[in-house]
Image (cartoon, rainbow, N blue to C red):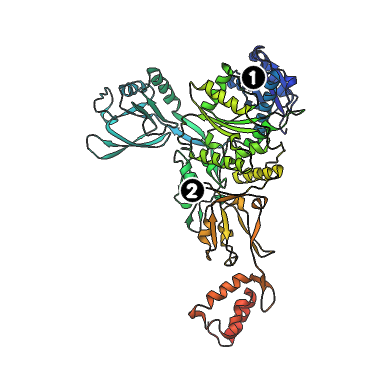
Amino acid sequence: MAAPWAVFLCDCRQTLRVEPARLDLPTLHVQCASDPERDAPRFAELLRRERCTHALVACCTPPEFFAEMLGADGNRLPLLHHVNLKEFCFWPHPDSAAAHAKASRLLRAAMRAAEAQGDPEYRPLHVGDRVLIVTDLPQGVRLAEQVRAVAQPSLLLLDATLVAQGVPRWRLHRGQLLSVSGRLGDFHVTFTEAASGAETRELHADQVVLVTREAPPVKARTGCHVLVNPSEAALASLVARLGDLMGDFLKVVHVSYDADICAGGASGREACGMCLSACPYTAIARDPENHLRVRVDHLACEGCGACVAACPTSALRFTDPAPAAFYARLAGLLAPLAGGDGERLVVLFHCGEEGRRLLEEAGRRPLPYPATVLPVEVPCLRFVSAAAMLTAFRLGAAGVALLGCETCQHGEREVLLQQLAFGHLTLEAFALGKERLRLFTTASGQEETTVASLSRFAQSLDAAPLRWQEVAWRQTGNREVLAAAVGAFIEQLGREPGQRRLPPSQPFAFAEVNAAGCTLCRSCVNVCPVHAFQLDKATSSLQYKHFACTACGLCAAVCPEQVIALRHEVYFERAALDYQTVVQDEMVGCSKCGKPFVNRKALEAVEARVLSLASLLDTFSGKRRALLRMCPDCRAVAAMFEVEAGWEP
């Protein structure tokens, strides 16, 4: 490991069976403690003495304690990282050897991911104290009275019988809600005003609260709070939450955007746009200054990751975890332990909401499940791409599970289901069975059922279909990682399943080129955002890499000869992973100097078009017809001689 690490392990006053000697870790600086407040200063001294830049803490004492303690002497604070070994390892797994093996994997994965993670980027965000409460319940009116202690509330009453006392006239509205748009600090609420009939009005607020009898058709998000028949305790908790979200903040930039590889369009033609429909918060839109590209509203982004998984070119990338850190974590989890273990490992991608809560609850009760289930927390299951799922298998997982909310706060999971469908199709193509990849959802009260289902899944798996191989993550774009995974499947399984048809929603296509009509004009090469087409000048050939193609359709749209047709299908073959020649031609030498200057098909196409125009027949008549078969330099000289001889172009 490049960075000097120290690891602090707490056995919770000797209630956990943590034995540092049984852990397989890439550092000698491991301290086991029973009392964090007593033993943490010794850990701080270890960090200073060994000049460690990273500290990994496995302790239930709040992270703030370690941050304060390590920075107390004014020295540079080591980067702190935390892992939950108590609830994820030692409580739910009674077998000590299995618990230590899992702990080794989780600690090692955290270390690898931290070293590959870059620094975050932030945007300033100001949130004022304007709170709009939309309600058809008396609880909403009472909430306005409570909110006055921390903010300036306004009311939109959806029920004509409700009475609000003490609310200024200009902050009291009656009507029917139409929509809620915007983001924390800048919400726009449209409604039809009751007093004027059908007149539509718009209100602005820093935060919006909906307190209603039934779930409204409004998506909850940061600053937009939805409460259905809430209790008084829920209202009181919300008031505190409203106050916490007011003020000046630095909001993390969840997604980076590379316009150079975006498939949004070219040559004046819009294409792709998969991210636009994937985002549940309309945080991504066509750039008004360049409609062929997109613009990300970082202040509106909720960081669910759906756009990142949907983007076929990886022009959109998540920042934390960064792709390199994410795959480094996977590699750290699945790399063999010292001596080998031969376990049927399961990668469990879980969200930070219900997924994490279930695992924590399974540890506290405890609800035992196999220690071979290795958790990887993601912002939302939408973040998990087919590339991530199949890479887990490439690195030696026997199965991949996804664990998330029964009802996701980010809405429908269309992008996730598309990614799952491609993962299932790939597994079935290689005769591995789609049952190795499963989606689990859970909610409060379903803990025992979900853990039992997850256990049965892990126990039902055969041995891992692929063996572990160390990977140098030079490319971390979705398509490159996916192609590498398919390549590993072909190599290790000795199978090339061939063609599989796909629905248009999947961003794959085979671009069929009619070689007889292609003139090698480079139009397809110039517009392809992922370089699926390239022109090899040395061999005068057009080459195509099928697995890079994202089905944006730009090549077919701009082809002047109209000889490209897209077929929605994918080929699981070695040849599909690299460039293959689809059109080849010979170069033609200049009729004067002999230097090759154009390919034959292009020359013939130019001659046919030029000589078919009546207005140009005189220009290229007699000796001047040979001008078309000269290189640009010789053509210019020959044309000047014709002018001197009396020709008027």
- Is the Cβ of the residue at disc 2 closer than 8 Å to that at disc 1? no
Where does the N terminus fall, quadrant-wise? top right
* Residue underneath mark 1: 93
Amino acid at pointer 1: His
Q: Residue at x 67, y 21 (%)?
A: 99
Q: In this view, does 285 lie to the left or right of 373?
A: left
Report which quarter residue 367 is drawn in: top right
Rendering quarter of residue 588: bottom right
Seen as rendered, the residue at the extreme bottom is 646
Percent of width and height locating residue 187: 39, 36
Q: Which mark is residue 273?
A: 2
Of badges 2 and 1, the one in the foreground is 1
Please state the horizontal and vertical placement of residue 89, each as a whole percent of the image. 64, 21
Can see residue 96? yes
Where is residue 257 drawn, in percent x and y? 54, 45
Between 134 and 525, which is closer to the camera in this rendering?
525
Image height of 340 relative to 282, above or below: above
In this rendering, position of residue 129 left or right of residue 264:
left
Q: Callout 2: helix, strand or loop?
A: loop
Q: Which of 443 and 179 is in front in this view?
A: 443
Res. 142 image quadrant:
top left
In the figure, 400 relative to 600: above or below? above
Q: Which mark is residue 478?
A: none
Is residue 324 visible from the viewing direction of this image? Answer: no
In the picture as drawn, the residue positioned furthest to the right comes out as 339
Secondary structure of the residue carrying numbered label 1: loop
In the image, residue 510 sits, relative to residue 635, either above or below, namely above
